[in-house]
Image (cartoon, rainbow, N blue to C red):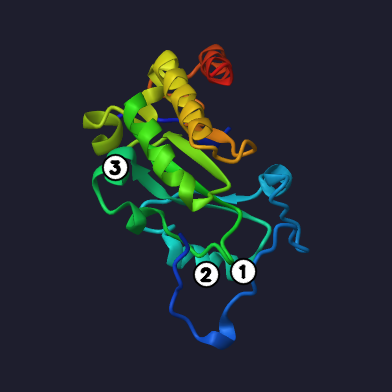
């Protein structure tokens, strides 16, 4: 299992709750600080993606606490979206959850591109590639997550294909493709290695 350093962050479904406790919809220019035309306006404060926790029910609860945070989905693999019930993985309460970012996991350019094309119909505010998960299942046998930090050129290709896929289906041009990574993996933890990884992805 990799010895990892600190992490860093470089259609709607109705949820059954008491009607009196439902949140009011988030407008395109929400008075509490979020503006869909400027997604970065609240990006400094976010709730990290957490497997088995940040599902749409938990995100609804978090949104009851604040409108000024970015919410992330659990990581969803590109293969699960392509071959599974993608609506189960992608639907969320669009009336209240924005800004919300979809996190994808995978290491195949073709599969990640296909997942982005499917996700485009759900109007997420950003799509994030997981380059930080340390689990054996993901970064070991799965060869993605934190393992991608050892492959800057491959990760650049993944991001490029995701961007290209979004544009091919007319996805909103302001939707960012982002990457969640760590400051190092095993012995690859120097500033120079991190800088090279970030600069390589910035050219995607």
> Does the image show residue 188?
no
What label does residue 82 carry, if any? 3
Q: Nearer the viewer, mark 3 or mark 1?
A: 3
Residue 156, x across and y down, in percent: 47, 19
- Give the crowd class for mark 1: few <14, some 14-19, many >=20 residues within 10 Å: few
Classify residue 22 as left or right of residue 152.
Answer: right
Q: Secondary structure at mark 3?
A: helix
For the residue carrying disc 3, how many other residues have a C-alpha within 10 Å: few (<14), some (14-19), or many (20+)? some
Residue at the location (38% across, 24% down)? 148
Residue drawn at x 52%, y 69% as measured from the top left? 61
Picture residue at 40% right of the left edge, 54% below the top: 90
Q: Is residue 97 above or below residue 23?
A: above
The residue positioned 45% from the left and 59% from the top of the image is 11
Say whether marks 3 and 2 touch (CB < 8 Å). Answer: no
Image marks 3 and 1: residues in contact by CB distance under 8 Å: no
Q: Does the residue at mark 1 contact the one at mark 2 (Cβ under 8 Å)?
A: yes
The Cα atoms of the two marked residues, 3 and 2, are separated by 28 Å
* Residue 179 vertical placement versus 203 (above, below): below
Q: Position of residue 140 (x, y in %)?
A: 25, 30
Q: Which secondary structure, mark 2? A: helix
Q: Which residue is mark 2?
A: 61
Pointer 1: what residue?
65
Looking at the image, tell me whether mark 3 or mark 2 is earlier in sequence order: 2
Q: Is residue 179 left or right of residue 27?
A: left
């Amino acid at each position: 299992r990799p010895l990892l350093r600190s992490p860093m962050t470089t259609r709607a479904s109705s949820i059954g709750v008491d009607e009196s406790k439902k949140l009011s919809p988030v407008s395109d220019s929400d008075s509490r600080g979020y503006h869909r035309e400027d997604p970065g306006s609240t990006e400094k404060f976010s709730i990290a993606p957490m497997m088995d926790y940040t599902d749409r029910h938990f995100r609804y609860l978090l949104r009851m606490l604040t409108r000024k945070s970015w919410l992330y989905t659990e990581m969803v693999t590109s293969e699960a979206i392509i071959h599974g019930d993608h609506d189960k993985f992608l639907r969320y309460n669009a009336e209240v959850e924005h800004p919300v970012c979809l996190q994808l996991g995978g290491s195949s350019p073709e599969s990640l591109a296909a997942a982005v094309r499917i996700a485009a119909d759900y109007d997420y505010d950003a799509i994030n590639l997981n380059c930080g998960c340390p689990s054996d299942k993901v970064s070991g046998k799965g060869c993605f997550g934190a393992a991608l930090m050892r492959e800057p050129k491959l990760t650049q290709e993944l991001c490029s294909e995701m961007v290209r896929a979004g544009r091919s289906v007319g996805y909103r041009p302001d939707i960012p493709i982002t990457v969640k990574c760590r400051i190092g993996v095993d012995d690859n933890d120097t500033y120079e290695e991190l800088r090279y990884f970030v600069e390589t992805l910035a050219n995607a």
